[in-house]
Image (cartoon, rainbow, N blue to C red):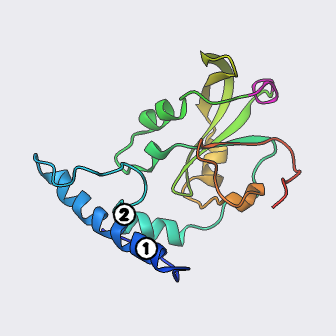
C-alpha cells in the first residue's frame, strides 16, 4: 500500500500539513481494517486519507489515455467500481444508481455509458431504457437499464480518462458527465 502519492509542492504550510495528516489517517485506516475495535473515531470516509494498493497505482500511472470519446456518451464516476474485488454484476448495479439524466440523454438511443473510478474506465454499457428512480420538486433522478458494449469495452476499459477529455478542469462531485456534442465548455 502507498499512503500518499501525487503530492506536489505545497502552496502553503497548511496544505503540507493536510497531506501529512491524510497519510497518517491512511495508515491508521489500514490498521482499522483488521481490528474489531476502532482506533480512530473521526475517519471522514472521504478519499483523503485512503491508502492505495501498489497494483492500483501502477494501473493508474501506466494506463494509456482513452481514445477519442464517442459523441454522444455519458461518463459516470462510480467509486465502488474501483474495488478490485467488485464483480461485473456489482459494477453494473452500482452504475445504475439515480442520475440526473435529462431529456436529451434519455431520448438518445443506444447511448454509451462509460463507467470510471479513480480515472480508470471500468465498464461500458449501452443504455436501452431509463426509468424514474426519484422525484423532487426541483428535478427527477433516473436509472438506466442496459447491456455491456463489448466493442467499446475493448477500446476503453483499463485506460485512463481525465476531465480535460470533456473540457473540464476536474470531475464534478456528483459523478455525472454528459458528453452529448463535440462542443467543449470554457476552461
Which residue is disc 1 drawn over? 5
**Helix, strand or loop at mark 1:** loop
C-alpha separation, residue under disc 2 versus residue under disc 1: 9 Å
Tell me residue 105's x, y (percent). 77, 30
Q: In which quarter of the image is residue 164?
A: bottom right
Tell me residue 128's x, y (percent). 68, 23
Q: Which of 73 and 67 is in front in this view?
A: 73
Horizontal placement of 137 versus 181: left or right?
left
Q: Which residue is drawn at 41% across and 51% down?
A: 46
Rendered position, 53 above or below 151: below
| Residue stretch in magenta | 102-107
Extreme-right residue of the structure: 183
Q: Residues within 10 Å of mark 1 (few under 14, many from 20)?
A: few
- Main SS, magenta residues: helix
Marks 2 & 1, CB-CB < 8 Å contact: yes
Quarter containing the N terminus: bottom left
Q: Does the magenta stretch include residue 176?
A: no
Tell me residue 38's x, y (percent). 15, 49
Which residue is disc 2 drawn over? 52
Q: Is residue 106 magenta?
A: yes
Amino acid at each position: 500500500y502507498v499512503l500518499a502519492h501525487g503530492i506536489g509542492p505545497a502552496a502553503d504550510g497548511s496544505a503540507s500539513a493536510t497531506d501529512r495528516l491524510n497519510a497518517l489517517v491512511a495508515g491508521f485506516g489500514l490498521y482499522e481494517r483488521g481490528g474489531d475495535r476502532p482506533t480512530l473515531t473521526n475517519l471522514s470516509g472521504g478519499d483523503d486519507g485512503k491508502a492505495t494498493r501498489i497494483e492500483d497505482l501502477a494501473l493508474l500511472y501506466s494506463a494509456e489515455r482513452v481514445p477519442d470519446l464517442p459523441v454522444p456518451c455519458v461518463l459516470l464516476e462510480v467509486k465502488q467500481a474501483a474495488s478490485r474485488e467488485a464483480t461485473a454484476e456489482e459494477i453494473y448495479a452500482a452504475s445504475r444508481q439515480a442520475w440526473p439524466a435529462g431529456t436529451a440523454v434519455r431520448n438518445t438511443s443506444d447511448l454509451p455509458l462509460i463507467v470510471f473510478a479513480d480515472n480508470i474506465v471500468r465498464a461500458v454499457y449501452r443504455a436501452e431504457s431509463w426509468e424514474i428512480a426519484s422525484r423532487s420538486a426541483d428535478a427527477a433522478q433516473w436509472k438506466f437499464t442496459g447491456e455491456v458494449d463489448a466493442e467499446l469495452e475493448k477500446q476503453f476499459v483499463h485506460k485512463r480518462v481525465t476531465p480535460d477529455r470533456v473540457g473540464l478542469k476536474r470531475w464534478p462531485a456528483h459523478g455525472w458527465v454528459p458528453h452529448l456534442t463535440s462542443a467543449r465548455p470554457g476552461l
